[in-house]
Image (spheres, helix red, strand yellow):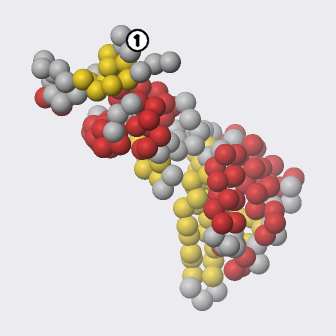
């Protein structure tokens, strides 16, 4: 078991004058090391990490995490804030909008098809006959995100936005390459979701 506590130290740089993270195994993590570890944690996750979770993992307050995120952004580390936590920006070189259609009960299978083919679902868009284009961010990057989205839909007794348009909608899909987007298109087509 590792015990961590905060210790005051006199000879710290201006940004770290109040405290350092000192672990019982003799490991001292200063602010720079902690920020490196924070980036490493964000690199190794597919789903957003909340500030609370990061603060527990790094044994600091949530406010320290918020400050570290601000410092990392100032150093040009591209960190996204989502409603579920922090993520490193997906290194995307390709984006495509797909027109799809499915029944309400197939939304989970549609999302899994996209994720399993290597895509990331940025948003959903519908074309309403009266209100015009309506879009909402989804930020679905993994199967775990799909599970959380489904739970949120069920707990809120919500229906998918595409139910308004009889299942017809669009998704902006992000990927590392055009080849992956082609794989997404093929997978959507083979499952009967893709419209031309």
Q: Residue at point 81% right, 49% down?
A: 187
Q: Secondary structure at mark 1?
A: loop
Where is residue 93 shown, x and y percent of the image?
Answer: 55, 41
- Look at the picture and state if 163 lies above or below 182: below
Where is residue 38 shown, x and y percent of the image?
Answer: 41, 31
In front here: 152 or 174? 152
Q: Residue at point 54% right, 61% down?
A: 137
Lateral position of residue 144 relative to residue 88, left or right: right
Q: Is residue 89 visible?
A: no
Near mark 1 (Cα within 10 A), the count class, few <14, some 14-19 or many ≥20, is few
- Look at the picture and state if 32 lies above or below 75: above
Residue position marked by numbered label 1 in the rendering: 25
Where is residue 140 shown, x and y percent of the image?
Answer: 62, 51
In terms of image quadrants, where is residue 133?
Answer: bottom right
Q: Residue at point 40% right, 37% down?
A: 55
Q: Residue at point 76% right, 62% down?
A: 107
Lateral position of residue 1 relative to residue 185, left or right: left
């Amino acid at each position: 078991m590792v015990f961590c506590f905060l210790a005051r130290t006199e000879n710290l740089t201006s940004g770290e004058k109040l405290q350092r993270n000192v672990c019982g195994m003799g490991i001292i993590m200063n602010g720079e090391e902690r920020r490196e570890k924070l980036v490493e944690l964000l690199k190794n996750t597919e789903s957003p990490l909340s500030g609370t979770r990061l603060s527990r993992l790094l044994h600091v307050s949530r406010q320290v995490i918020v400050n570290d995120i601000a410092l990392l952004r100032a150093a040009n580390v591209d960190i996204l804030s989502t409603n579920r936590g922090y993520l490193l920006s997906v290194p995307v070189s390709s984006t495509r909008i797909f027109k799809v259609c499915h029944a309400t009960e197939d939304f989970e299978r549609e999302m899994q098809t996209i994720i399993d083919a290597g895509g990331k679902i940025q948003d959903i868009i519908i074309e309403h006959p009266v209100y015009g284009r309506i879009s909402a961010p989804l930020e679905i990057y993994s199967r775990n995100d799909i599970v959380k989205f489904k739970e949120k839909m069920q707990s809120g007794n919500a229906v998918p936005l595409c139910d308004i348009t009889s299942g017809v909608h669009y998704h902006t899909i992000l990927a590392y390459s055009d080849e992956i987007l082609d794989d997404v298109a093929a997978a959507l087509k083979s499952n009967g979701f893709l419209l031309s």
